[in-house]
Image (spheres, helix red, strand yellow):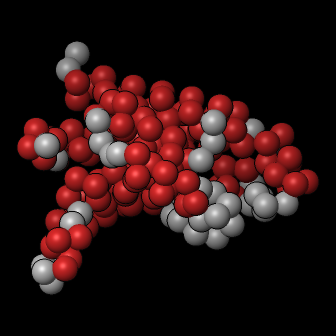
């Protein structure tokens, strides 16, 4: 078996386990990709936490797991501050992030956390409300539902990077 076969599966397992035991979906995806493909750094990881639960646990923004995958891809091919300051346009990042986004939409029907929750649970939960959060957990929020989303995104991101962007990994 090659790295192209095993690393995405390992990324899935790590992200799934981290989401089940530690939470913060973007961080779980980024941790899995850091440990399998050595992508990202401490600043990116730390900065991602507020994007969990559809941004600030609001569930009204983009799924944090998807955000984690997009951040990982962007850290490889996104525009740097120096390129931004020089007024350079760098659009390659959209080619790859759109592929991940489209795969997520095909699976979950929407990028929004509340819509993903509705698909998985039959309803959306207010993660900032203690009682609703308890109901979310009782319904399997961190048993299998959100862990599977984080696992899928980590696996899909690893597959995309290894298939489409492997030369970029070697340049680092």
In depth, the one of 138 and 115 nearer the eye is: 138
- Quarter assignment of residue 32: top left
Query: Farthest residue toward the top?
Result: 1
Q: Where does residue 62 sit, x and y in percent of width and height?
A: 53, 65
- Quarter assignment of residue 58: bottom right
- The answer to whether any part of residue 12 appears in the image is yes
In depth, the one of 23 and 118 nearer the eye is: 23
Q: Where does residue 3 sit, x and y in percent of width and height?
A: 22, 24
Query: Farthest residue toward the right?
Result: 131
Image quadrant containing the N terminus: top left
Query: Farthest residue toward the bottom?
Result: 87
Residue at image position (87%, 54%) is 130
Total labels: the figure holds 0
Q: Is residue 162 above or below residue 133?
A: above
- The answer to whether any part of residue 110 appears in the image is no
Q: Where does residue 154 sit, x and y in percent of width and height?
A: 41, 41
Q: Is residue 109 above or below residue 158?
A: below
Residue at image position (59%, 38%) is 19
From the viewer's perspective, is 21 left or right of 107? right
Residue at image position (67%, 55%) is 117
From the viewer's perspective, is 47 left or right of 61? left
Image quadrant containing the C terminus: top left
From the viewer's perspective, is 60 left or right of 46? right
From the viewer's perspective, is 80 left or right of 167? right
- Quarter assignment of residue 106: bottom left
């Amino acid at each position: 078996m090659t790295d192209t076969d095993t690393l995405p599966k390992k990324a899935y397992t790590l992200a799934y386990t981290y989401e089940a035991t530690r939470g913060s979906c973007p961080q779980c995806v980024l941790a899995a990709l850091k440990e399998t493909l050595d992508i990202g750094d401490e600043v990116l990881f730390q900065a991602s936490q507020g994007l969990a639960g559809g941004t600030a646990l609001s569930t009204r923004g983009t799924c944090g797991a998807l955000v984690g995958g997009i951040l990982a891809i962007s850290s490889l091919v996104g525009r740097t501050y120096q390129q931004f300051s020089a007024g350079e346009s760098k659009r390659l990042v959209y080619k790859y992030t759109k592929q991940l986004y489209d795969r997520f939409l095909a699976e979950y029907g929407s990028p929004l956390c509340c819509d993903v929750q509705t698909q998985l649970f039959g309803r959306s939960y207010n993660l900032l409300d203690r009682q609703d959060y308890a109901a979310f957990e009782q319904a399997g929020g961190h048993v299998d539902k959100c862990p599977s989303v984080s696992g899928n995104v980590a696996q899909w991101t690893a597959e995309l990077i290894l298939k489409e962007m492997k030369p970029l990994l070697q340049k680092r």
